[in-house]
Amino acid sequence: MINLPKFSYSKLDTFVQCPMKYKYKYVDGNYVQSDAVHLDLGNLLHKVLEIKHRNIIEGIRNDYTYLKEVYLKGIAEDTDKDKGNFIIGVNAIKEKFGEDTFIEVNTKSNLSYVDKLETFLHYLENDSIGEQWKPLAVEINFNFEYEGKVILNGFIDRIDINDKGELRVVDYKSSNKIYEDKDLTTPLQMFIYTLACENIYGKTPVEFMYDMILLGEKQLACTKGYYKRGLKKLNKILDSIFEAEKTGVYAPKATPLCHWCDYSITNPNAPFYSQDLCNYYSLWTPDNKTFKVNRKFDEFEF
C-alpha cells in the first residue's frame, strides 16, 4: 500500500498563505511552539464548549458552576485531541500574559478580552443551537483517503442533526471580527469537513455555521455550488504543493501578515530560534504601515 502524505486544513491553509512558510514548517521541520493569549484562550473555550455539548449528547444535565470552574482553573482530559495535555484556565492565562493584555482594546473588534469573555460566559449559559437541531458529536476525529492522492485528517468542533437526519457542521471561532461575505462562499475548511462527513456518516451536510464565540455572532457559510468550487480549489492547492515539491521552489507571499509569522524578524513574539529564518518578509508593522519587502525572491537561488 502506498504511504500517502497527510494534510490537515491548517497545513493546506499555510501553503495558501505563504508557500515559503509552509516549507519552513512542514518540509524543513521547523516547528514552533507559539505562545499567544488568543491560542490559550481558544483551546480553553473550545474545551468548555466541548464538555457542554458532550453532556447534552450523553443526556447529562450541565452544571454551569462546574463549567465556569473549568473556564477559570482549566482541565486535563484524556481525549484523542488533548491526550496528556493540561488546558490552562483564564486565571493562569491572565497570570501568564498580564492583566494589561486583557484590558487592551483590539482595533478590529473595538473590544477588550474582558468584554469578549463576558460575551462568552453569557453565551455559554444562554445559547441554544435551535429547536430543530441537537448535537450529534463533538471533536470528531477524521482521517480518510482523498482521490488516492493524500490523507485528509483533523477534527470538527461539532456536528448537529435534525429530525430529518440532516447534518449541520459547526466550527467555533474566537476571532476578533466576523468574516466578510467573500470568505463565506467556498471556505476550504468547510469543504474538507463536508468530505469528512461523507466519509464518516455517508451524508453531505445541509448547513454550515461559524460560531463567533467571543463576539456573540453566528455566520452561515457555503453558498450554492460550493461543492464543485471546493473540489476545484482543493485539487488546485494540492497540485501546487506537488509542483513545489517537485521543483523545490516555494515562492514567498510577503504581506502585512508577515508581522505575525513565526519565521519573520518583524514579529516581536516569534521565538528567537525561528524569527530570522525568512529573508523575504514584509517590512509592514502596526506602527509603520508602508508596505515594502525586505528582499525580492529569486527562484533561481534555489
Image (spheres, rainbow, N blue to C red):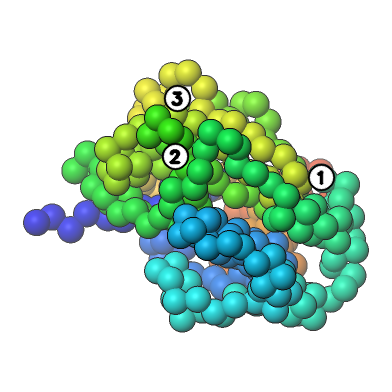
**Near-viewer residue (61 or 193):** 61
The three-letter code of the residue at mark 2 reads Ile
* 10 Å crowding of disc 3: few (<14), some (14-19), many (20+): some
The label number, if any, that marks residue 161 in the structure image? 2
Q: Which residue, given by chain and number where applicable, does mark 3 sit on?
A: 226
Q: Nearer the viewer, residue 229 or 16?
A: 229
Callout 1 amino acid: Lys
Q: Nearer the viewer, mark 2 or mark 1?
A: 2
Left or right: 143 in relation to 167: left
Image quarter of the N terminus: bottom left
Within the image, what quadrant is residue 92 found in?
A: bottom right
Across and down, in percent, residue 234 comes to 38, 36
At mark 3, the secondary structure is helix
The spot of residue 181 in percent (x, y) is 65, 26
15 left or right of 264?
left
Between 289 and 279, the residue placed more toward the observer is 289
Q: Nearer the viewer, residue 36 or 239?
A: 36
Q: Position of residue 66 (x, y in %)?
A: 67, 72
Q: Residue at point 41% right, 42% down?
A: 193
What element does badge 2 sit on?
A: strand
261 lies left or right of 193? right
**How many residues crowd around disc 1 within 10 Å: few (fewer than 14), some, or many (20 or more)?**
few
Disc 2 vs disc 3: Cβ atoms closer than 8 Å?
A: no
Q: Secondary structure at mark 1?
A: loop
Residue at numbered disc 1:
108
200 up-or-down from 52: above or below: above
Mark earlier in primary sequence (2, 3) = 2
First in sequence, mark 3 or 1: give its number. 1
Residue depicted at x 46% and y 60%: 58
